[in-house]
Image (cartoon, rainbow, N blue to C red):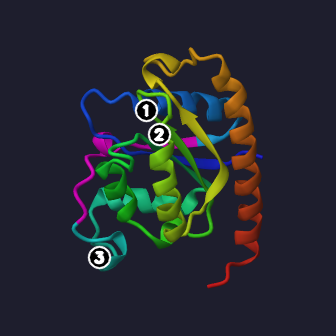
C-alpha cells in the first residue's frame, strides 16, 4: 500500500551532513513505492516562529505555511531527520515542528538521527520522542540512527555503510505498519 510520507529535515547549517540522510530516505522510501515529500527549512525559507499556523485567521497565513498545512493534512506518516546539538535537537527542527499542531494528529512519526560520532544522534532522538508525542504524532518504537554520517552515506544519498540497508528495511517495515494501521483508523474516525 503506497503511503504519503513527509520527511521533516531540521538543519539549516551551510555544511550540513544530514541532507545525505534525507537523500537516502527519499530514494529508499520511493523505491518501496511511497510518495515522499521533503520539508527542508532552507529550501522553503521558513521564518522563525512568530505565530502558529492555527493562530492566523483563515486564509491569511503566509503561503509557505498554507502549503505545509496542505501537505501535512494529506500525510500518512512523518519521518523526522535530526542531528544532535548539545545532546538535543537542532533549533531549526524545533522551529519547523512548532508551526503546526492539529495537522500532525493521529499520524505516526519515525525518527532518523545522525551524528559525526559513534552514537548516531540517539541522545537527540530521546528528546525528540517526547516532543513528537506531545505534537500528536508519536514515534514508532524503532529508531534509525546513522553514526559517522560523513562516511556512512555519500553526498548523493547512497549507502556506504553496508549495515544501513538491513537496518532501514526493518525500520521502514515498522513505519509502514503503523502508518497503514493509523490511516485505516483515521478513516473510521478519530476520538475528537
Identity of the residue drawn at 22% across and 58% down: 48
| Magenta region includes residue 121 | no
Between discs 1 and 2, the one toward the N terminus: 1
Identity of the residue drawn at 30% across and 80% down: 57
Give the left or right position of residue 138, taking residue 117 as reference: right
Q: Nearer the viewer, residue 91 or 63?
A: 91
Q: Nearer the viewer, mark 1 or mark 3?
A: 1
Q: Which mark is residue 115?
A: 1
Question: Contact (CB < 8 A) between labels 1 and 3?
Answer: no
CA gap, disc 1 to disc 2? 5 Å
Q: Secondary structure at mark 2?
A: loop
CA gap, disc 1 to disc 3? 36 Å
What range of the chain is rendered magenta?
36-49
Question: Contact (CB < 8 A) between labels 2 and 3?
Answer: no
Dot 2, how many residues are within 10 Å of its Cα: few (below 14), some (14-19), or many (20+)? many
Q: Position of residue 91 (x, y in %)?
A: 29, 51
Q: Which mark is residue 56?
A: 3
Quadrant holding the C terminus:
bottom right
Look at mark 2 in the image and give the residue it sits on: 121
Q: Secondary structure at mark 1?
A: loop
Amino acid at each position: 500500500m503506497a503511503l504519503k510520507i513527509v520527511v521533516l529535515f531540521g538543519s539549516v547549517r551551510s555544511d550540513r551532513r544530514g541532507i545525505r540522510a534525507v537523500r537516502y530516505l527519499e530514494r529508499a522510501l520511493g523505491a518501496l513505492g511511497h510518495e515522499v515529500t521533503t520539508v527542508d527549512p532552507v529550501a522553503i525559507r521558513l521564518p522563525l516562529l512568530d505565530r502558529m499556523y492555527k493562530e492566523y485567521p483563515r486564509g491569511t497565513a503566509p503561503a509557505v505555511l498554507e502549503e505545509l498545512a496542505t501537505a501535512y493534512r494529506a500525510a500518512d506518516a512523518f519521518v523526522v531527520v535530526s542531528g544532535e546539538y548539545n545532546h538535543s535537537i537542532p533549533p531549526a527542527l524545533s522551529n519547523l515542528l512548532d508551526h503546526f499542531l492539529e495537522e500532525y494528529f493521529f499520524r505516526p512519526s519515525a525518527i532518523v538521527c545522525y551524528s559525526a560520532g559513534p552514537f548516531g544522534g540517539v541522545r537527540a532522538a530521546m528528546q525528540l520522542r517526547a516532543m513528537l508525542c506531545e505534537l500528536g504524532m508519536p514515534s514508532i518504537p524503532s529508531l534509525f540512527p546513522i553514526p559517522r554520517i560523513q562516511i556512512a552515506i555519500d553526498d548523493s544519498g547512497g549507502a556506504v555503510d553496508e549495515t544501513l540497508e538491513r537496518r532501514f528495511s526493518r525500520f521502514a517495515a515498522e513505519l509502514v505498519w503503523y502508518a497503514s494501521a493509523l490511516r485505516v483508523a483515521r478513516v473510521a474516525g478519530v476520538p475528537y
